[in-house]
């Protein structure tokens, strides 16, 4: 799978942009703040229904405008399809696929991408929300229908929390708590599927992460993955951040039963605190190196190697599982963050993918292994296109 052409209208700092992309390596070069990341961010949005930089769509619309347009002509073998997204600052976004209206949640069916960015260091050192988001984005790439499951869970969770707040404020009992029982069942149904899918995904990732870590770090530091699952904890308030470590898959039916038991056990505290204390929104991906938690013990270089290994493992899993073939790999300002050996190893690891998009402020940060189309960006404009040769010269 690859992107043949990208068109932006009023996206970020682009009034209008058109760029043709080739198979292999495409490098966007420009000083900081010129808009090179904005180009690849637009493609990441098509693939994951979100930005890797901001949580609000409003920031993606050019200042003073009501909406932004992202159009991408996608190619898979001899087949081409045009995907168009209208991002609206004050209303629901709209999608067209092949000039026909489509559902927003269906977008990931058409474009698979895996994005590496400086923010990825937070996958190792940051809070659990980033690790949950990484897993869920990958789940959607592998099975787009799960976008609906995740969205429905978030909606049910918000509704349940609203009901808990109302019950605490009014001291509601009886009928009010019966309504809570109804929302509990929906929360269990959706949440158990999400937890089961995450556990299965982590099982699939383990071997890929181990291989990718060694390839990037040049050493085996015994990387390990495990999920910390809140619905399995005896005490969500005092156990290891309210979770129980799990390193194997669990059947969704068993998870559902444990989820119900956990909700029943913590209900008094939930009514007191007016918040849902158990569920996939409270879980975490646990990372270890050399038998110690990576968060807090891994060095800067080890943390980077682990973060990159997670992304490479995701790309390999999509490559194996998707009928569309290779995902588009996006490396956003990553090489500037790495030392020379890790730059070279990462370049070797990604060079075999069908299409790789790279952004850099300094052309010299990009290893000579990654040569291809060079696209210069200046002040929200495509400022020139050239072809790089294998020896690094520009034609």
Image: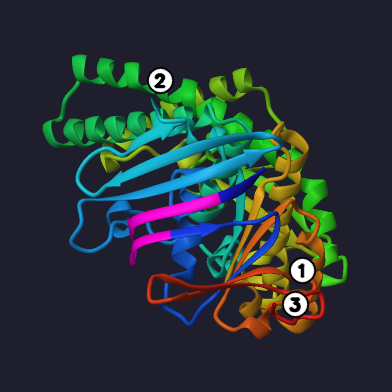
Residue drawn at x 54%, y 26% is 192
Q: Is residue 256 left or right of residue 367?
A: left
Residue drawn at x 15%, y 30% is 171
- Residue 294 at x, y percent in the picture: 68, 65
Real-space CA distance between mark 2 and mark 3, rounded to the nearest whole angstrom: 50 Å
Quarter occupied by residue 266: top left
Residue drawn at x 40%, y 33% is 96
Real-space CA distance between mark 1 and mark 3, rounded to the nearest whole angstrom: 7 Å
Sequence-first tag of 1 and 3? 1
Residue 347 tag number: 1
Sequence-first tag of 1 and 2? 2
The residue indicated by pointer 2 is 186
Q: Is residue 27 above or below residue 58?
A: below
Cβ–Cβ under 8 Å for marks 1 and 3: yes
Helix, strand or loop for disc 3 = loop
- Residue 155 drawn in magenta: no
In the image, 244 versus 137, the foreground residue is: 137
- Residue 374 at x, y percent in the picture: 62, 71
- Residue 15 drawn in magenta: yes
Real-space CA distance between mark 1 and mark 2, rounded to the nearest whole angstrom: 45 Å
Quarter occupied by residue 346: bottom right
Quarter occupied by residue 364: bottom right
Residue 367 tag number: 3
Helix, strand or loop for disc 2 = helix
């Amino acid at each position: 799978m690859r992107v043949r052409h990208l068109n932006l209208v009023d996206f970020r700092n682009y009034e209008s942009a058109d760029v043709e992309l080739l198979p292999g390596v495409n490098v966007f070069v420009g000083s900081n703040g010129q808009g090179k990341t904005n180009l690849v961010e637009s493609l990441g949005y098509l693939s994951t229904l979100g930005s890797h930089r901001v949580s609000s769509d409003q920031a993606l619309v050019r200042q003073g405008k009501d909406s932004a347009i992202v159009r991408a002509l996608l190619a898979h073998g001899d087949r081409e399809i045009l995907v168009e997204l209208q991002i609206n600052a004050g209303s629901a976004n709209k999608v067209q696929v092949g000039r026909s209206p489509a559902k927003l949640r269906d977008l990931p069916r058409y474009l698979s991408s895996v994005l590496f960015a400086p923010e990825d260091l937070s996958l190792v050192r940051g809070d659990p929300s980033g690790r949950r988001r990484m897993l869920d984005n990958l789940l959607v790439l592998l099975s787009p229908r799960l976008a609906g499951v995740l969205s429905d869970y978030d909606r049910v969770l918000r509704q349940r929390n609203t009901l808990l707040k109302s019950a605490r404020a009014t001291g509601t009992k009886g009928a009010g708590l019966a309504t809570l029982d109804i929302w509990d069942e929906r929360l269990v149904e959706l949440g158990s599927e999400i937890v089961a899918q995450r556990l299965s995904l982590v099982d699939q990732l383990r071997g890929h992460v181990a291989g990718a870590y060694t390839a990037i770090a040049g050493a085996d530091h015994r990387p390990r993955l495990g999920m910390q699952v809140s619905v399995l904890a005896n005490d969500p308030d005092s156990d290891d951040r309210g979770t129980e470590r799990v390193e194997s898959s669990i059947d969704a039916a068993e998870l559902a039963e444990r989820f119900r038991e956990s909700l029943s056990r913590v209900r008094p505290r939930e009514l007191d605190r007016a918040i849902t204390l158990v569920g996939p929104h409270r879980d975490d991906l646990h990372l270890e190196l050399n038998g110690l938690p990576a968060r807090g013990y891994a060095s800067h270089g080890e943390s980077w190697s682990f973060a990159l290994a997670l992304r490479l493992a995701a790309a390999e899993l999509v490559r194996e599982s998707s009928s569309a073939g290779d995902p588009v790999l996006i490396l956003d300002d990553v090489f500037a963050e790495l030392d020379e050996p890790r730059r070279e190893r990462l370049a070797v690891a990604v060079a075999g993918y069908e299409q790789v998009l790279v952004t850099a402020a300094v052309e010299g940060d990009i290893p000579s292994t990654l040569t291809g189309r060079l696209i210069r960006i200046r002040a929200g404009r495509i400022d020139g296109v050239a072809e790089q040769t294998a020896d690094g010269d520009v034609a």
